[in-house]
Image: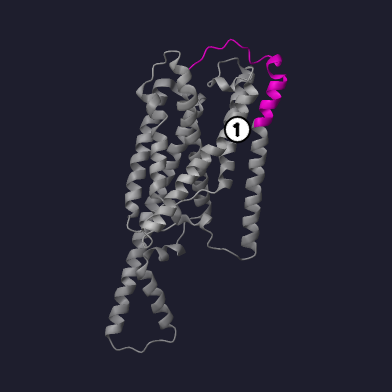
């Protein structure tokens, strides 16, 4: 999608006007607030850890990156889905780059599509690790159970500490997942994965909603030729991410929207830098700072982050709510 635009974006008159100042505030102010939110949350978490509280914080547990939402679902099922999704997204991205070249990353759509591809690549690797840990945990629990049964069948003198050990082993047999808690992946990788999930959750909603609700009707008036690649880029990422969210047990907090805001802000600043250096067309008409209603467009796009991220959050919370009601014995979060 390339729109004709003869405005010289390298001239000072283009940038030194009140519309640009309002648009800059609409972008930088949310980014500053997002950074402050992240800093406040991390400071609070570090303070909690310094006090020795909440060491098993779910936000830092690595098992949520690969553990399905139900115990009846084997982690290998989630692994298979993620590998297939990653392969499909990567193939689509390579095909798009082959057709359009490097300029394909001029669009926010490709930024988001690449982000989701990276997310599924990381998810696949974490699921491989998770399947290994799951198998190791179940094997250990099985061996402990066999040893306990053999010991009970033969004459022996129990040690003073053996009763507590047997109770612990029995609990592991009843729930193999509990044994995995002692073998978590490095918290930093779990944290990075959660950030990718939070950014992708909002970015795919924003990308697809803006395209199908705002851009596509405008292009239809110009007899735009809608091809398979365009439809694929604006639908498959959301479908696959929602499917993965339905299978995994991850949650997203409202504070996670901060990363999403920063992600979009970086893209807009990237566009500003390019247009300040060279006079080229804008990838999206509402980004043009010379438009009469540019401040309103920028404010609208900033506000759209809230419903886009919030809608994905509501979907996840609804899923967790119904699964906990319908499958109380198998549900895990």
Image position, residue 53 (x, y; %): 60, 65
Residue 197 visible? no
Would you identify the image quadrant in which residue 87 lies?
Answer: top left
Would you say residue 7 sits in the magenta stretch? Answer: yes
Residue positioned 51% across, 15% down in the render:
3
Residue 22 visible? yes
Which is more toward the observer, 146 or 54?
Answer: 54
Residue positioned 53% across, 50% down in the render:
191
Would you say residue 177 sits in the magenta stretch? Answer: no
Image position, residue 322 (x, y; %): 40, 53
Residue positioned 59% across, 42% down in the render:
258
Would you identify the image quadrant in which residue 113 lies?
Answer: top left
The residue labelled by disc 1 is 302
Which is more toward the observer, 26 or 10?
Answer: 26
Would you identify the image quadrant in which residue 236 lies?
Answer: top left
Up/down of 145 relative to 152, above or below: above
Image position, residue 277 (x, y; %): 63, 19
| Residue numbers of the magenta segment | 1-26
């Amino acid at each position: 999608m390339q729109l004709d635009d003869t405005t010289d974006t390298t001239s000072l008159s283009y940038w030194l006007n009140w519309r640009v100042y309002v648009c800059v505030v609409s972008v930088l102010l949310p980014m500053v607030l997002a950074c402050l939110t992240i800093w406040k949350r991390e400071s609070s978490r570090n303070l909690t850890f310094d006090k020795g509280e909440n060491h098993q914080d779910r936000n830092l547990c690595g098992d949520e990156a690969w553990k399905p939402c139900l115990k009846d679902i084997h982690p290998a099922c989630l692994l298979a889905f993620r590998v297939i999704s990653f392969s499909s997204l990567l193939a689509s991205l390579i095909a798009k780059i082959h057709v359009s070249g490097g300029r394909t990353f001029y669009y926010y759509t490709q930024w988001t599509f690449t982000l989701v591809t990276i997310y599924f690549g990381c998810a696949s690797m974490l699921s491989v690790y998770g399947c290994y840990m799951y198998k190791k945990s179940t094997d250990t629990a099985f061996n402990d159970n066999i040893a306990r049964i053999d010991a009970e069948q033969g004459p022996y003198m129990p040690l003073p500490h053996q009763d507590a050990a047997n109770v612990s082993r029995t609990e592991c047999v009843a729930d193999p997942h509990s044994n995995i808690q002692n073998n978590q992946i490095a918290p930093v990788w779990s944290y990075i994965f959660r950030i990718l999930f939070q950014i992708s959750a909002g970015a795919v909603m924003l990308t697809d909603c803006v395209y199908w609700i705002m851009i596509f009707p405008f292009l239809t008036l110009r007899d735009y030729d809608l091809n398979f690649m365009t439809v694929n880029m604006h639908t498959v990422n959301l479908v696959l991410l929602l499917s993965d969210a339905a299978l995994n047990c991850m949650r997203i907090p409202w504070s996670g929207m901060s990363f999403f805001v920063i992600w979009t802000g970086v893209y807009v600043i990237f566009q500003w830098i390019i247009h300040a250096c060279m006079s080229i067309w804008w990838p999206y008409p509402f980004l043009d700072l010379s438009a009469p209603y540019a401040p309103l467009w920028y404010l609208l796009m900033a506000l759209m982050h809230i419903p886009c991220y919030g809608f994905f959050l509501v979907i996840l919370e609804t899923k967790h709510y119904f699964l906990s009601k319908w499958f109380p014995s198998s549900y895990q979060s």
